[in-house]
Image: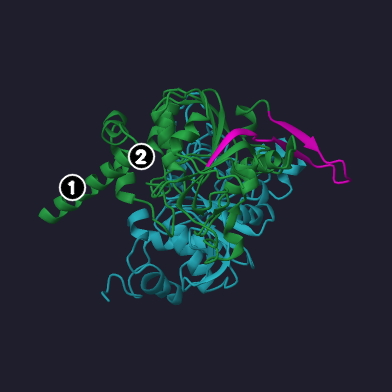
Chain colours: A green, B cyan
């Protein structure tokens, strides 16, 4: 069977400017940050990003990689407002298709099921209809005759997701409390890349119940082992959210943050984070 | 226990707010109480401990938990959204802006194309308001929040729902708006906002001045009800002994 393992840079080499890229996770939770960081290092730009937005959106917006964002929000969870998303929106530097959380989910379901749209009772009466003039409604053919929003399929060129465990064939397992929508992202995209905290061999999935096997290999193009790859977002039980570092990210001017943490590859990033934590701990001990 | 925090101390403004929030979930039955903010969270737990024991609560992540924090069910986002559209939930959301008919904005301030202040985005406010009861919590009642027109309708108000037709109004309901000054509702012929009760110590004029639109004020406005001795004890000694409520609503 096909061994789908590759490096983060291999994944990025298969993407190109102008693509529509879905990013899994939710807010500042289980985001494929190592893949996002690899994207930041590349020349790729002009992206349409589909995301329940967190720092993935903030980083790509700050780096000027976004042409368009399709999202219901961007947040860091423990810090409600994503500062770099905010700054870029206030500068008018990318286009936004702002939709409701449920509309977004049905857009993923539609794409995964090869449907052009799915009806949803959300959006009607809200300004989501005003700011997305292309959204249309559909009337039930049954006797209720109700009218719903026809949420268009959110089909993507590529999806990037991060899970706790994966095998070389592309099967992915989540061990935290919430699958988010990572399986749908993979099924809704033409290609899907799964990064994982740890690659496992045969029998490596047995320790957890079968329903943790969220992502199935038929929907996966490539697998990347990236320990701490969701950093600084949460990836329990492997690692929680790095709250002090997230705070640093949220309060440091972008050029300064990028210069200190994003100048090199993933190893350099993880080393820079470790150094920052060591310096911080040393400073606290001096106090 | 000190005399200023014990059951004998006078009820604080924050505690009236807790009571007003808790009462939003009275007689709701077996539904998910989704409180956003500190005071609504205390209110939901108070309601569950007293008059609405069948309420469901989450741990803020993907678990349904009892009052002791022990898991009793699983509610990841995809199931949470089904709970919303199935109507078995009563959420109390915040609001960056709220208008006379209950349209709410958490998305952005200013022109949507290039906002002066980007906030969260609409999040689940559109699906919430069309599918399950949505109340609001505003810890600082001011003309900045209570505006004539919101900049980006996230949560749908009564006028917008009516204009959008029967599919929008079918399950639409805004039971109440709780603020640091009082309780508001939409029990008027045209479904515009009405002052329903004043927290003790607040005058109707104060509320009028803090509201950026013409508010319906009945001739006689009742006071927000007093907490019972047992409710005060639960708030002070069991649910919020650290007095987090005072940080959201200072006395």
Name the image quarter holding the C terminus of chain A: bottom left
| Residue A183 within the segment the image draws in magenta | no
Q: Residues within 10 Å of mark 2 (few under 14, many from 20)?
A: many
Separation of residues labelled 2 and 1 (CA atoms): 20 Å
| Residue designated by label 1 | A279
Q: Is residue B149 visible?
A: no
For the residue labelled by badge 2, is the local secondary structure a helix, a strand or a loop?
helix
Q: Foreground: A251 or A116?
A: A116
State whether residue B135 is above or below residue A43.
Answer: below
Label 1 marks which chain's residue? A
Label 2 marks which chain's residue? A
For the image, the number of numbered tags is 2
What span is in magenta?
A135-160
| Residue designated by label 2 | A266
The part of the image, by quadrant, that contains residue A153 is: top right
Residue A115 placement (x, y as % from top left): 75, 38
Q: Foreground: B56 or A48?
A: A48
State whether residue A14 is above or below residue B38.
Answer: above
Residue found 49% across the figure and 29% down from its top: A13
Marks 2 & 1 on one chain: yes
Q: Residues within 10 Å of mark 1 (few under 14, many from 20)?
A: few
Residue found 60% across the figure and 71% down from its top: B54
**Mark toward the viewer: 2 or 1:** 2
For the residue labelled by badge 1, is the local secondary structure a helix, a strand or a loop?
helix
Which residue reaches farthest front? A1
Q: Foreground: A149 or A10?
A: A10
State whether residue A61 is above or below residue A187.
Answer: above
Residue found 38% across the figure and 49% down from its top: A228
Residue B173 placement (x, y as % from top left): 65, 50
For marks 2 and 1, the one nearer the N-term is 2
């Amino acid at each position: 069977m096909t061994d789908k393992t590759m490096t983060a840079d291999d994944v990025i080499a298969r993407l190109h400017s102008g693509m529509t890229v879905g990013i899994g996770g939710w807010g500042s939770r289980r985001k494929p940050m190592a893949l996002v960081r690899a994207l930041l290092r590349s020349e790729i730009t002009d992206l349409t990003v589909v995301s329940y937005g967190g720092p993935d959106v903030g980083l790509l917006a700050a780096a000027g990689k976004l042409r368009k964002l399709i999202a219901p929000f961007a947040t860091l969870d423990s810090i409600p407002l994503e500062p770099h998303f905010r700054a870029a929106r206030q500068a008018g530097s990318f286009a936004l298709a702002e939709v409701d959380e449920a509309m977004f989910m049905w857009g993923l379901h539609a794409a995964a099921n090869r449907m052009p749209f799915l009806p949803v009772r959300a959006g009607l009466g809200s300004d989501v209809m005003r700011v997305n003039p292309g959204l249309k409604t559909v009337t039930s053919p049954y006797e209720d005759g109700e009218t719903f929003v026809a949420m268009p399929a959110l089909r993507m060129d590529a999806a990037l997701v991060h899970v706790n465990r994966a095998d070389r064939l592309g099967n992915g397992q989540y061990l935290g409390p919430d699958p988010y929508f990572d399986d749908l992202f993979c099924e809704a995209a033409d290609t899907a890349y799964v990064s994982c905290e740890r690659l496992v061999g045969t029998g490596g999935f047995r320790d957890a119940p079968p329903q943790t096997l969220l992502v199935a290999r038929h929907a996966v193009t490539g697998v990347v082992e990236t320990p701490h790859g969701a950093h600084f977002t949460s990836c329990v039980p492997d690692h929680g959210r790095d709250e002090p570092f997230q705070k640093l990210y949220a309060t440091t001017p972008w050029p300064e943050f990028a210069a200190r943490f994003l100048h090199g590859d993933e190893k350099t990033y993880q080393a820079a984070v470790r150094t920052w934590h060591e310096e911080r701990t040393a400073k606290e001990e001096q106090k | 226990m000190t005399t200023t925090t014990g059951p004998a101390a006078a009820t604080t403004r924050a505690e009236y707010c807790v009571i007003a929030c808790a009462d939003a979930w009275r007689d709701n039955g077996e539904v998910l109480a989704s409180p956003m903010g500190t005071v609504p969270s205390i209110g939901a737990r108070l309601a569950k401990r007293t008059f609405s024991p069948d309420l469901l609560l989450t741990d803020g992540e993907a678990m349904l938990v009892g009052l002791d924090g022990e898991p009793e069910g699983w509610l990841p986002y995809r199931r949470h959204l089904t709970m919303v559209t199935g109507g078995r939930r009563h959420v109390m959301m915040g609001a960056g802006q709220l208008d006379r008919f209950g349209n709410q904005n958490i998305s952005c301030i200013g022109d949507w194309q290039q906002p002066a202040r980007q906030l969260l985005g609409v999040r689940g406010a559109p699906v919430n308001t069309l599918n399950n009861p949505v109340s609001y919590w505003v810890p600082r009642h001011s003309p900045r929040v209570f505006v004539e027109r919101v900049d980006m309708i996230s949560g749908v108000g009564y006028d917008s729902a009516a204009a959008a037709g029967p599919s929008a109004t079918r399950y639409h309901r805004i039971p109440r708006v709780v603020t640091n000054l009082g309780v508001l509702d939409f029990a008027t012929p045209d479904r515009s906002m009405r002052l329903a009760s004043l927290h003790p110590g607040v005058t109707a004029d104060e509320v009028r001045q803090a509201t950026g639109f013409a508010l319906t004020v009945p001739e006689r406005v009742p006071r927000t009800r007093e907490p019972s001795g047992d409710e005060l004890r639960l708030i002070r000694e069991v649910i919020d002994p650290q007095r987090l409520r005072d940080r959201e609503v200072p006395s």
